[in-house]
Amino acid sequence: MIHTHDRENFFPGRCVLVNGPVIVGAGPSGLAVGAGLKQQGVPFVILERANCIASLWQNHTYDRLKLHLPKQFCQLPYFPFPDNIPEYPTKYQFIDYLESYARHFDINPQFNETVQSAKYDKTCGLWRVKTIESTSGAMRREMVEYICRWLVVATGENAQKVVPEFEGLEEFGGQVMHACDYKSGEAYRGKRVLVVGCGNSGMEVSLDLCHHNAIPSMVVRSSVHVLPREVFGRSTFDLAVLMMKCLPIWLVDKILVVTARLVLGNIEKYGLRRPSIGPLQLKNSEGKTPVLDIGALQKNQIWRYQGGPRHQEVFRRWSRARKRRKS
Ligand SMILES: NC(=O)C1=CN([C@@H]2O[C@H](COP(=O)(O)OP(=O)(O)OC[C@H]3O[C@@H](n4cnc5c(N)ncnc54)[C@H](OP(=O)(O)O)[C@@H]3O)[C@@H](O)[C@H]2O)C=CC1
Ligand SMILES: O=C(O)C(=O)Cc1c[nH]c2ccccc12
């Protein structure tokens, strides 16, 4: 007979005892933790739901993407970028680098394993991490329970897409996609595209659409800090990091905003407003990343619907205009 307590603990899969940490996620952070542990000779297991390392970079980024920050800020510990890589690596160069990083440290994640739960068992001081095979279509998906003393969650800041509700989407008739599925503007030549969101993704997708002679418009919900990626040939981020070493954050913010104003002009003429809090302070308090501009701001073919109307109202107007054009 199985008691309730036993039933809770009953697990129909394999059980693996890990003599070190379990790391969830084989993205840059998971790999970096793995490399550190390898160097100390500590055994570990990396669990990854996708079938490759850095799956967000491999599968959910657009073709033209380049890192925003100079390479020295994006490299992982103990293994710098090769010298022949440019200052702002492309996504392909970044992925190659991560692949060689994993090879260099002989890191072999367990792919196609999705963590379903992780519970800390206080009585024995151990984590119980349950996974299920992620390969779809398998008749019986394998389940494994890992038991370990340490758990490292390295699942990423932006792994989960957020799609706002859109009333009237069924009647819209046009194609709708999230930025994580956008590859290039090639398919949108000559077409009107409404881009919802004015973060780095929204700005760069709009710029890519311009490069492909599509006609993007943007929905700008709130205020946003736009900084030039470079000032006098020097990375703005690099300058911010340098200034932070000797100046208070509010002053660095003031300098960044004044410099951005000198380089880019008043962003209100591009349909944008700046937040009252400075860019670094806003990043610290709300996690909101400033937009690092690589040319989208000044593309005057991008129309920006600013402020008041939320995506819903703009979308309704947009949808109606599309129907009028089609009829
Ligand atoms: N080349 C690079 O290195 C790139 C880096 N990135 C990075 O990836 C991360 C994710 O960036 P991103 O994908 O842009 O996401 P963000 O969360 O940074 O931006 C999302 C944007 O969408 C807006 N938004 C959300 N919901 C709605 C809605 N319902 N109606 C209208 N607007 C809405 C937000 O407005 P609000 O502010 O009002 O919430 C915000 O402006 C960031 O750290 C970014 O810097 C992204 C692209 C390129
Ligand atoms: O561009 C990105 O995706 C970044 O995350 C860059 C970034 C993070 N924190 C910052 C603070 C000031 C300027 C850029 C950044």
Image (tube, helix red, strand yellow):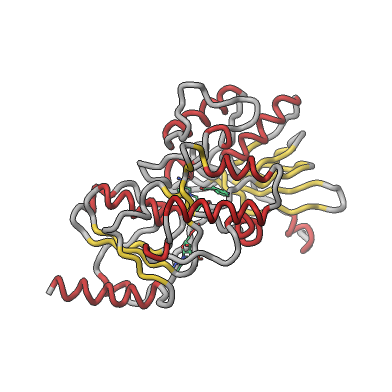
Q: In this view, does 38 lie above or below 50?
A: above
Q: Where is residue 315 in the image (x, y as percent from the top left)?
A: 33, 73
Q: Quarter of the image containing the C terminus?
A: bottom left
Residue 279: quadrant of the picture = bottom right
Residue at x 23% of width, y 50% of height: 187
The residue lying toward the viewer, choosing from 145 and 326, is 326
Residue 92: quadrant of the picture = top left
Is 315 left or right of 235, judged from the image as shown? left
Q: Is residue 50 above or below residue 4?
A: above
Q: In this view, does 145 lie above or below 96?
A: below
The residue lying toward the viewer, choosing from 53 and 241, is 241
Is 225 left or right of 185, judged from the image as shown? right
Residue at x 54% of width, y 56% of height: 257
Q: Where is residue 276 in the image (x, y as percent from the top left)?
A: 57, 67
Q: Residue furthest right?
A: 123
Is 168 left or right of 282, judged from the image as shown? left
Q: Where is residue 82 in the image (x, y as percent from the top left)?
A: 51, 22
Residue at x 87% of width, y 52% of height: 123
Q: Position of residue 85 (x, y in %)?
A: 46, 26
The residue lying toward the viewer, choosing from 41 and 215, is 215
Residue 103: quadrant of the picture = top right
* Tally of marks: 0
Q: Is residue 41 above or below residue 8?
A: above
Residue at x 65% of width, y 54% of height: 251
Q: Quarter of the image containing the N terminus?
A: bottom right
